[in-house]
Image: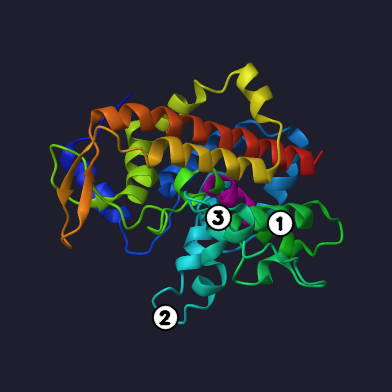
Amino acid sequence: MIRIGLIALATALAAAAVPGAALAWGDEGHEVIGTLAYKRLTPKARKAVDALLARDNDALTKPDFTSRTTWADKYRDSDRSSTQLRYLATRQWHFVDVEIDGGSLDAACFGRPALPDGTAASAGPAEACVVDKLVQFKQELADPATPAAEKTLALKFIMHFVGDIHQPLHASDHQDRGGNAVAVEVPPSTRQSNLHAYWDTYLVQRLGTTVAAAAANVRQVITKSKVQAWSGGTIDDWAGESFAQAKATAYDFQGEKTFVDDHGGTGELLDANYEARALPVARQALAKAAVRLANLLNEVFR
């Protein structure tokens, strides 16, 4: 594992700590997933995916598969400081905030309303969760009657949302906006960030200082037996796994010291013991996301 310096770490955490943001894995994590998933595509699936992306002139990201895994975040934030049309229409699609204490998938998915007949998934209601949007976009991608432009949108949202659903803090909430309201410090630094940013960025960068290095690290846990185990289940099950990891690991501060944060509240000092518990969870979550993204696209384009 390649470790980053404390100054770089503080900078990375600060960059991720945008108030109210929900940037699952950050660009690096999504690109790690994309790097590994693309290599697992069948020739037929790769040809179909490449053809869709080749016709896409959107300039929010570079046009290659790995870069397009970050597109949904760029799209959401492209008018965040202006009209907020895209931001408000899609921001809730990136997560499913099941409450740690007594929450349910149905409640976190706004009662799971069906997409109205004749409505494209990309134009779906703003109140929808990542689980249901993945199902809708997968159906569109597999349907020969879906217009090419909508298929391209479906593909780009899928490429991102599979990553989102595997970030534990995108499948859970503890009345803290998915960890965004939990102040953290990583000793010996006293630079404050939040729990969501820690999982988005810090843990990924602990796996490697470049996307290629982190992807090589994550690839080591993708064994034949693991692929078989991860290839079953539904999208609902993926969310359930992430929720369980959030409850068991992300929100487990047992043994951690606290501090008074910038607002007079209590923050968590996340030491080496917390990292030792969290890092394998993040590593496996990235691996699962890569395998499942490839499996989903291979199934659609078989």
Q: Eyeballing the image, is 90 above or below 266?
A: below
Provide the residue span drawn in magenta.
Answer: 156-164
Tell me the residue at 35%/56% (across/down).
Answer: 180
Question: Where is residue 140 shown, x and y percent of the image?
Answer: 77, 58
Tell me the residue at 65%/41% (across/down).
Answer: 237
Number of the front mark, 2 or 1: 1
Number of the front mark, 1 or 3: 3
- Answer with left or right where residue 145 lies relative to residue 135: right
- Is the C-beta separation of discs 1 and 3 under 8 Å? no
Question: Where is residue 74 shown, x and y percent of the image?
Answer: 48, 62
Furthest-front residue in this view: 102
Q: Tell me if residue 289 can be seen.
A: yes
Tell me the residue at 15%/47% (across/down).
Answer: 259
Query: Which numbered disc flags the more N-terminal residue, 1 or 3?
Result: 3
Within 10 Å of the Cα at label 3, are there few (<14), some (14-19), or many (20+) other Cα atoms?
Answer: many
Going by the numbered disc 1, the residue's amino acid type is Phe
Question: Where is residue 139 shown, x and y percent of the image?
Answer: 78, 54
Tell me the residue at 56%/72% (across/down).
Answer: 89
Q: Is residue 162 magenta?
A: yes
Residue 137 is marked as: 1
Q: Eyeballing the image, is 166 above or below 223?
A: below
Local SS, label 2: loop
- Residue assigned mark 3: 96
Name the image quarter holding residue 210: top left
Residue 82 is marked as: 2
- Answer with left or right where residue 96 lies relative to residue 47: left
Q: CA distance from mark 3 to mark 2?
A: 26 Å
Number of the front mark, 3 or 2: 3
Going by the numbered disc 3, the residue's amino acid type is Val
The quadrant the N terminus occupies is: top left
